[in-house]
Image (spheres, rainbow, N blue to C red):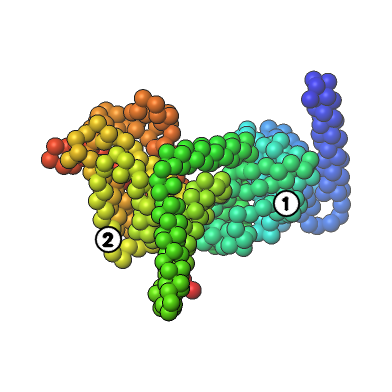
């Protein structure tokens, strides 16, 4: 606002104050004349309290004390004029009652002014905040609207006050509104993300904090809602999530490239078995007396091997497909067994012996099968490649799956090798992006693996091997147990 505009507003306010003061003076003069010259035998001077109450709305403390003193002076003057020669007890008592009424009213008005000033100062403090802050009553009607809310949403305080908040802002709640309100009534607060629509139609995502105010009897009175604009942060998080998904997809495709020989081996095995069983079936059928029983067995074996080949292709397509993760209840023992089938050829080519230990009756976990297979394949390939320069007796890969109850119920997958391992000082940065112990490594595999595990609510960590020679590395990932559903 310009200086001239501010000056004109101040001039207008001063003119109104002078007008109200003149009206109060006329009112006091009228009361004085009636009190002095009216034959009514009553405490007319009590009416000066109306002048005090009226003046309290437009004058400050000093002015109010001056007006109250003037009213008391007029009361005393009227008493002196009317009873100069005849001081009766009843007249004196009426005068004292009037003076007492003016005094009490003045004190109460001063206290009310102080309280109002304090509330005004507190409201001004809310306007200093960059957050959007507004207050709603129990019917969701806006009763207060700070400058931060004006700037974020576009409506002025005059336009917003009196409107229903959810309707004005077209709020999108992360859960049914009744459920959120119930939590606020129970705990006195709530925090979460909301999506609002501004006056110009833009959608803004806010981190919203609700605080409930209760009266002296504990009944809900109002809710103060504080909203911080996190639209840009959410957009950045979504872009980061997309970038991580793209990197994970690239890693999966790279992994498939490294497993080309294993893929061919896995697919060729059932196909070769189908051909062998088909030829056997033809031989049984071409006999002088066809052996239908043996032919039937051969056909059943062909069907079983065809299904196996189909499952292998489906798993490979799932690993290569670019899709959003789907979390379902999984048996990690089955996931590991399927994953091992994909690395059999790598184990053979590198002369690595595999030792598996899968505990029986594992509790189910909630996760995406393809992503978890990607993590285990990455850990296993790293271990296999780390043992390339080791003697044959040190080329051992151990994969175990067992329940974990250290901190919270879950399932732990451990991948251990007998390679040279990693120096202790490098362990804290092992999962950092672009950190690699390989000469030709990109340093993304372990970082993406950690992102996947943490997205499943789990954790992954590395340590030096715990054998007698302290050889190799041990990677452990722990996934939380799936919660039991209540029907």
The Cα atoms of the two marked residues, 1 and 2, are separated by 52 Å
Q: Is residue 115 visible?
A: no
365 above or below 296?
Answer: above
Residue 240: mark in rendering: none
Residue at 58%, 62% (x, y): give it: 179
**Residue 79's spot in the image, x, y percent?**
76, 46
Q: Tell me the number on the disc at residue 359.
A: 2
Is the N terminus in the top left, top right, bottom left or bottom right quadrant?
top right
**296 sits to left or right of 224:** left
Residue 38 coordinates in the image, percent (x, y): 87, 52
Relative to 14, residue 108 above or below: below
The secondary element bearing badge 1 is classed as loop
On screen, 95 above or below 243?
below
Query: At 45% across and 61% down in the image, what residue appears?
Result: 274
Front of the two marks 1 and 2: 2
Q: Relative to the observer, which residue lies in front, 130 or 178?
A: 178
Residue displayed at 23% across by 40% down: 395
Point 14% across, 37% down: residue: 469
Residue sitting at the far front: 288
Q: Position of residue 58 (x, y in %)?
A: 76, 38
> Which residue in the protein does label 1 denote?
170
């Amino acid at each position: 606002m310009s200086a001239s505009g501010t000056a004109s507003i101040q001039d207008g306010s001063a003119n109104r104050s002078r007008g109200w003061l003149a009206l109060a003076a006329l009112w006091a003069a009228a009361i004085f004349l009636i009190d002095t010259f009216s034959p009514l035998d009553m405490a007319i001077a009590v009416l000066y309290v109306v002048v005090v109450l009226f003046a309290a709305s437009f004058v400050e403390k000093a002015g109010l004390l001056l007006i109250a003193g003037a009213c008391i002076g007029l009361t005393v003057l009227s008493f002196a004029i009317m009873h100069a020669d005849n001081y009766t007890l009843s007249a004196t008592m009426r005068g004292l009652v009037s003076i007492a009424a003016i005094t009490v009213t003045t004190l109460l008005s001063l206290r009310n002014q102080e309280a109002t000033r304090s509330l005004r100062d507190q409201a001004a403090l809310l306007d200093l905040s960059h957050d959007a802050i507004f207050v709603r009553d129990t019917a969701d009607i806006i009763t207060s609207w700070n400058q931060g809310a004006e700037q974020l949403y576009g409506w002025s305080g005059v336009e917003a006050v009196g409107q229903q908040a959810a309707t004005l802002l077209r709020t999108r709640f992360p859960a049914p509104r009744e459920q959120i309100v119930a939590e606020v009534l129970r705990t006195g607060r709530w925090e979460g993300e909301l999506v609002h629509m501004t006056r110009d139609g833009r959608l803004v995502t806010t981190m919203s904090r609700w605080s409930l105010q209760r009266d002296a009897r504990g009944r809900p009175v109002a809710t103060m809602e504080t909203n911080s604009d996190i639209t840009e942060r959410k957009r950045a998080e979504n872009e980061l999530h997309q970038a991580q998904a793209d990197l994970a997809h690239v890693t999966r495709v790279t992994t498939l490239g490294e497993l080309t020989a294993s893929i061919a081996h896995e697919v060729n095995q059932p196909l070769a078995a189908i051909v062998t069983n088909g030829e056997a079936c033809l031989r049984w059928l071409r006999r002088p007396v066809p052996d239908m029983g043996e032919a039937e067995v051969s056909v059943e074996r062909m069907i079983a091997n065809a299904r196996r080949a189909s499952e292998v292709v489906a798993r490979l397509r799932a690993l290569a497909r670019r899709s959003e993760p789907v979390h379902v209840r999984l048996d990690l023992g089955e996931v590991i067994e399927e994953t091992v089938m994909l690395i059999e050829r790598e184990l053979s080519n590198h002369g690595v012996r595999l030792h598996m230990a899968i505990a029986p009756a594992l509790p189910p976990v909630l996760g995406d099968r393809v992503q978890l297979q990607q993590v285990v394949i990455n850990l296993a390939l790293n271990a296999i490649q780390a043992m390339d320069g080791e003697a044959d007796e040190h080329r051992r890969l151990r994969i175990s799956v067992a329940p974990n109850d250290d901190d919270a119920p879950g399932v732990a997958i451990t991948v251990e090798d007998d390679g040279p391992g990693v120096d202790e000082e490098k362990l804290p940065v092992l999962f950092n992006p672009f950190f690699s112990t390989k000469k030709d490594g990109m340093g993304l595999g372990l970082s993406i693996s950690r992102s996947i595990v943490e997205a499943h609510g789990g954790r992954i960590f590395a340590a030096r091997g715990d054998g007698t020679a302290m050889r190799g590395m041990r990677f452990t990932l722990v996934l939380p147990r799936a919660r039991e559903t209540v029907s």
